[in-house]
Image (spheres, grey):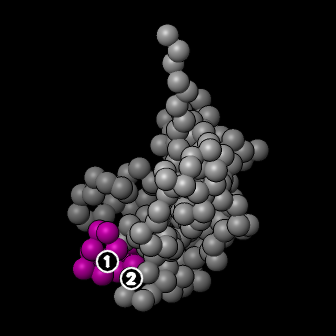
Amino acid sequence: GHKAKGYIMAIVRNPYDIVVRMWLFLGGVEFMDFHDFVYSLCNNIEFKEKIIFPIPLIREFMFGQFFDRHGKCKADIILHHENINDGLNALLDIYGVSEIGRWKPRGIFTSSVENGKKYEEYYTPELQKMIEKKYALELEGFGYTFEGLVDNNLFADGSKIKYNPITCEGKIF
């Protein structure tokens, strides 16, 4: 019989935002000072407590799970977290989904805000440079800077990045 084609969809988020969310998820200041967390993360220093998830997955490349062992991005569609509502509705338009099946967001998806503090407020210039160096491939490859998206594209292009999760080697075309 006829086999329907499926699509692999992924969502990317600003690496600066991800690091803050990860730190908050692990307990924030009760876990460790943010500066120490970023320093340890960027310098591959082991944390006192054993952390199984998500640290080992993102030590080398935050979005490594999108790539196969040949370095090819397996995601057919990559949405930017910052534009997820518009991106999902654009996909529904592309695939001709009627108003009945439309995505109805419960709220606006934005960057990390904890107690009214945005992710940018957690970083000193030193920490910002550390993340910029550690996650340069993610930032450039998916169109991010410290301030946010380079452009306002709803979708990211994973085909311009090659990353091998086995050798932890990556580059941008």
* Rendered view: 89 above or below 170: below
Choose between 111 and 127: the one closer to the eye.
111
Q: Label 1's element?
A: helix
- Res 163 label: none
Residue 24 image-quadrant placement:
bottom left
The residue at 73%/66% (across/down) is 151
- Tally of numbered tags: 2
Residue 114 pos. (x, y %): 38, 82
Find the distance from the CA under tag 2 to the CA under tag 1: 10 Å
Is residue 60 located in the magenta-colored stretch of the structure? no
Residue 114, label in figure: 2
Q: Give the prevailing secondary structure in the magenta stretch.
A: helix
Q: Residue at x 34, y 60 (%)?
A: 46
Q: Is residue 44 left or right of residue 152?
A: left
Magenta stretch, residue numbers: 24-37
Q: Nearer the viewer, residue 163 or 80?
A: 80
- The residue singled out by tag 1 in the image is 28
Rendered view: 1 above or below 22: above
* Residue at image point 43% right, 64% down: 41
- Label located before the other in sequence (2 or 1): 1
Front in this rendered view, residue 9 or 91: 91
Q: Nearer the viewer, mark 2 or mark 1?
A: 2
Which residue is depicted at the point 49% across and 70% down?
A: 109
Callout 2 amino acid: Glu
Does 153 sit left or right of 75 as displayed? right
